[in-house]
Amino acid sequence: MIDKAIGLIPAAGQGLRLGLPYPKELYPIIRENRYKPVSQFVLDRLVHAGVEDVVFVINETKHQLLGFFGDGHRFGCRIAYAVQERRTSGNHSTSPGLAHAIDAAYHLVRGRTVFFGMADTIMEPPDVYRRAWAAASPDDDVVLVLFPTARPEKFGMVDHQPDGRVRRVVDKPRETTLTDMWGAIIWRPRFTEHLHAAVERGMSDFAEILNEAIDAGLRARGVPVGDGTFSDLGTYEEIAELDSSLRQP
């Protein structure tokens, strides 16, 4: 186990784009004739990395998520839940709610190394977190797990040097020459404190908070997973693409 590690999975979104009668985090993925909800994939990746404690950030309607995952013992970990209450803001963020979702678990993750992943994504191979942690240096405050993408307008694109040092994160650019997006993040307590202070000051855009941390001297490293894949199931189009790929011989 990684010393003082804790997994963090935000799952407080309303999922309005899909209009499902259940939380989108429980959308069924069928592999080898077995059902697995999409959110179990990131949980499995965390457990594979040796993370034993995991926090789901939920809203007040996600009772079915609690019913499926419970206390985590069936999945090889201990699961706790933090509630993110709805907030209204005049800020126009390209990642609305993400910073507040992370900060909703501040009382549970402070002082610990956070392994962060999104509940509606599937990352391959299973050892993506292990690879990223193995590539990190002791002085890295933030480690971004990078995947190649041909759709930069959908993701947080990462400008990084050949040695992995991150210069900037550009969130969902319409045009860019960047090719790597972040799919998961590992960070140490300094970034937890920075994000908490930024949210307290009224910031809500996660990319802006991350870039501000870099400007303030926190060290961010990008670790490319060149042979990896990243699937985001935020829309029916993306679900159809994933389903088509799974049907390939």
Image (spheres, rainbow, N blue to C red):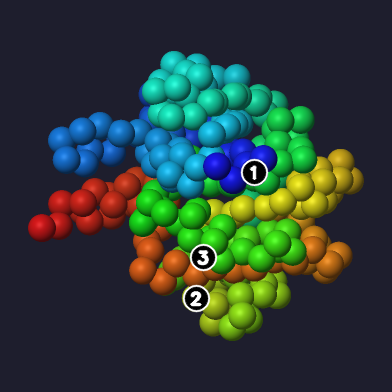
Q: Which mark is residue 146?
A: 3
Q: Secondary structure at mark 3?
A: strand
Q: Position of residue 125 (x, y in %)?
A: 36, 56
Q: Position of residue 41 (x, y in %)?
A: 39, 41
Q: Secondary structure at mark 1?
A: loop
**Who is closer to the viewer here, 242 or 229?**
229
**Residue of label 2:** 179
**Residue of label 1:** 3
Quadrant of the image containing the N terminus: top right
Q: Secondary structure at mark 2?
A: loop
Please tell me which of labels 2 and 3 falls first in the chain: 3
- Marks 2 and 3, how far apart in space? 10 Å
Three-letter code for the amino acid on which mark 3 is drawn: Leu
Q: Residue at x 67, y 75 (%)?
A: 165
Q: Is residue 56 left or right of residue 151?
A: right
3 vs 1, front mark: 1
Q: Is residue 77 visible?
A: yes
**Who is closer to the viewer here, 29 or 18?**
29
Q: Position of residue 95 (x, y in %)?
A: 63, 51
2 vs 1, front mark: 1
Q: Residue lying furthest left in this view?
A: 249
Please tell me which of labels 3 and 1 falls first in the chain: 1
Are the two marked residues, 3 and 1, in contact with CB atoms closer than 8 angstroms? no
